[in-house]
Amino acid sequence: MSSIPANLNPPSKAVSARLLLPWGKWGLRLTAFLYLGFLVALPLATIIRSGFADGLSAFWRDVSNPTAFGALKLTLMSSVIITIINAVMGTLTAYVLVRFRFPGKGLLNALIDMPFAIPTLVTGVMLVALYGPQRTVGAWLTSHGVQVIFATPGIVLALLVITYPFVIRAVQPVLMEVEKGQEEAAYTLGASKWTTFRKVVLPAITPALITGSLLCFARSLGEFGSVVVVAGNIPGVTLTAPVYVFGQIESQNQRGASAMSILLLVLSFTLIVTVEWMQGRNRKINVPS
Amino acid sequence: MVEGTQKDNSGSGRGIAAAGGEKRVQASTSRITRARIGEWALIAVVVLYAGGLLLAPLLAIFWGAFAEGFAAVAREMTSPDAISSLKLTLIMAVAATAINTVFGVCIAWVLVRDRFWGRRILNGLVDMPFAVSPVIAGFMLILLFGRTGWLTPLTDAIGLKVVFALPGILLATIFISLPFVIREVAPVLSHLSLDQEDAALTIGANRLQTFWHVTLPAIRWGLLYGVSLTFARAVGEIGAVLVVSGGVSRLTETSTLFIFRSLDDRNYIGANAMAVLLAGISFIILIVIEFFKKRTQQTQTL
């Protein structure tokens, strides 16, 4: 995900005066503000009003009742799990893609973006097709007492698929910039590959790793399409927060749905803003002299 | 153990030419072999993980759909409901993409080329659709245009039905696919040198001509990349359109809604068939995305 570069140079005054005549400038600004105001700011305002419609105590009750709280806990827990897995496997995948050469590398590189193209609902249906009880893999797993579909492992799997590209795509460009020379210097000085990774590569990619992981976490908080198919959605057991919100909407409990939504919104938005801030900072640090 | 070396060296870059004799050469060679084995082990782990996570379910769904026979799949994919849902998905995706492209370029321009109070707020608003769960997005539209919605009196006055109808689905699709064009065009735009635009202005082109003939071609790869991402997102949307179209209804059904309802009706062949179709379409879109992405990265490194 790209962002507004922090070190962008707006055109000099003279140039910008020529480029953007006053009415044109205000016309564009107004368009931008109206478009985003109508499509984003206004909906946000309504949901905040709806969630706090009956005051703070009602809001608290809406998010702390057993079903809601259980859903929130499940969402947070599974998001943490998949973020950790993605941090490890994502870094490893990026490293392998950047440093090694092997047949099918181009194919793998393209495949990584698959979760960006595939509908989340289709992902859920695919997972059920592979791990559902009727299928060979699912039947084998069930006979060994492992339940994937309609259980937490299924949720984790779905989230892993959906968030697969984030860490990889965040770390990959940074890895490409880490000079191979530095790594090779470390080898010739006697460091093992693992030590080199730990002391040379890891510090360089840590900011990107963090931003990728935060994006991954934020994305998995709100995941609906794949989870609703795979999870079984039993309150307290396999009901995640977004599916809970959906249930509340269906039961006409607008205030309850709004309350949980606000919570999720605040969490994700904070994460995204943090990511943008970090990306801005990283860019300042990495500006070549 | 080779004399003088206690460390666990991987072997690459270590001079085999260093004095020491046969034993040392053999030890270095086995270090290199161990390093190579280590490399291939890592590659294997990564490839198996990717294959197991992404490819295996994809193959499973193709297998599952055609397990009941090609005829059943073909019948489901050509049913009137399926075809009309595909049509609706296409129309909605194209419309949402077109609208988001036009406004997206405008917003990217304002964010990159302009300085004014509130720019950060604008930037934050662009990020919102990334942070919002699709169900919440659909819900916000219900709050705005539903029975007790803020804007419902307005739409009632002009006789426009938004939620549980096509305009609602369109709005939901626009919302969730909003940021992509902006986020891909903005960096490309900010890296553009203004020389060519200046030149065009000095030879008498007005701003619109300059934009159309100079700026637009310069940002075209980033723009196309953002457009393809927008389209993919719009095609795949389920959460928001599910809420806005009133849960499960046959009336205004996109392809994803078709799958959802089929699962609800236990029509697993239908659901799998449509899922296979959408997966196939997504693959084509993925190829297009990768193409534009590569072009964008090439022009950015020039």
Image: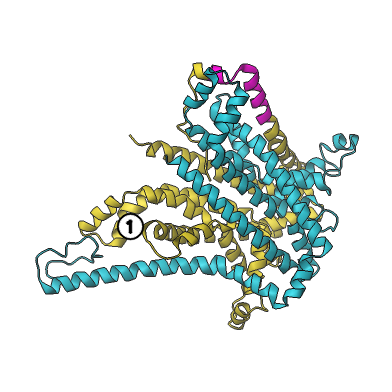
Chain colours: A yellow, B cyan
Task: Tell me the amino acid under the disc marked 1.
Answer: Phe
Q: Please, which chain is the residue tagged with disc 1 on?
A: A
Up/down of A129 relative to A121, above or below: below
Q: Quadrant of residue A224?
A: bottom right
Which residue is located at x 71 percent, y 68 percent? B272
x, y percent for residue A268: 59, 47
Q: Is residue B72 left or right of residue B176?
A: right
x, y percent for residue B235: 69, 53
- Please state, as top left, top right, bottom left or bottom right, where the N terminus of chain B lies in the image: bottom left
x, y percent for residue A34: 70, 30
Q: Which residues are magenta?
A: A16-33
- Is residue A22 on the magenta stretch? yes
Residue A247 seen by the camera? no
- Magenta portion: prevailing SS class: helix
Q: Nearer the viewer, residue A289 or B130?
A: A289
Counting the numbered discs, the total is: 1
Reading the image, the residue beneath label 1 is: A197
Q: Nearer the viewer, residue B222 or B51?
A: B222
Q: Quadrant of residue A36?
A: top right
Which residue is located at x 44 percent, y 51 percent? A171
Q: For the view shown, which residue lies furthest in the bottom direction? A: A143
Q: Is residue A200 left or right of residue A219?
A: left
x, y percent for residue B105: 61, 35
Up/down of B27 relative to B299, above or below: below
Which residue is located at x 62 percent, y 17 percent? A22
Q: Nearer the viewer, residue A124 or B215?
A: B215
